[in-house]
Image (tube, grey):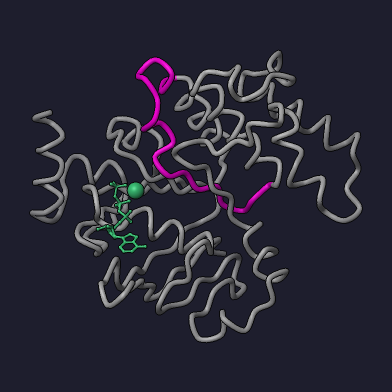
Amino acid sequence: MKVLEVKNLSKTIDGTVIFKDANFDMEKGEVICIIGSSGSGKTTLLRCLNLLEVASTGTIFVDGNEYFDYKSFAKLKDEEIRNRQLQLGLVFQNFNLFPQYTALENILLAPSLRKGSNKEQLKNDALNLLDQVGLKDKANLYPHQLSGGQQQRVAIARALILNPEILCFDEPTSALDPELTVEVLKVIKDLASKNKTMIIVTHEMSFAREVSNKIIFMDNGEIVEISDSSTFFTAPRTERAKKFLSNYKNN
Ligand SMILES: Nc1ncnc2c1ncn2[C@@H]1O[C@H](COP(=O)(O)OP(=O)(O)OP(=O)(O)O)[C@@H](O)[C@H]1O
Ligand SMILES: [Mg+2]
């Protein structure tokens, strides 16, 4: 079964179309990279998928169940929206860790609020996740005591502990120096090798090519091309994609 189906999704803000007619789906274990020039609507699409913004039209199904319908969304109670949001996780560009909490506390915050959560089990899970992202010895440090790459890896662990069906990333390395980028991309590649279903907005073309099964190429609010990765990078179908890729090669 499809883990995600997006049908006719669009977002208009104050009469301006930010993106329109987004149609795509994904299988469990697939990794999709969304690429496209600045301002093409990638972040807004991701925020609509995560219900941080309400799309203006369209429907979204997760695991075959209705997750978003623009016609009925306004009637949903906050608790129902939060429950649905748990099905997708989002890792932000700027990590967004709480500065007053340690790495471990940042990871434990959201799951501890769940009814009937087992604190010991959660702490074990959190420590295992910190180990998985290479930060076993940093559990008790505060964000300001961690490098940007380390903070981003804590943010990834924080998203993973909620075990979302789909983990989304919005330019997870764009705030990082190149050497810190490598360690974050390594963690994401590791997740891909474990068949974690992921949607990643990125400007890192070689990473996108390596990690994704499918590419969604956006330009000016439109999904111009959806292709499997090797096809996209070797034989893009559209002129717009060709131009976009040639700009990258020239940089
Ligand atoms: N709340 C808003 N009000 C008005 N315009 C907005 C709003 N949010 C986004 N936009 C506009 O929508 C367009 C798409 O923005 P978005 O952030 O989704 O692009 P992006 O593809 O993520 O770009 P980048 O690669 O620079 O991150 C931009 O022109 C932006 O100015
Ligand atoms: Mg963006």
Q: Residue at x 31, y 36 (%)?
A: 209
x then y, percent, for residue 162 = 70, 47
Residues 134 and 31: in front is 134
x then y, percent, for residue 120 = 91, 34
With respect to residue 157, does 91 lie above or below? below
Q: Quadrant of the C terminus?
A: top left
With respect to residue 131, does 167 lie above or below? below
Q: How many marks?
A: 0
Location of residue 247 by image quarter: top left
Location of residue 42 by image quarter: bottom left
Q: Which residues are magenta?
A: 163-182
Horizontal side of 47 relative to 88 (left or right) equals left
Q: Residue at x 43, y 19 (%)?
A: 180
Q: Residue at x 8, y 30 (%)?
A: 250
Residue 167 counted in the magenta span = yes
Q: Which residue reaches farthest front? A: 100
Horizontal side of 76 relative to 32 (left or right) equals right
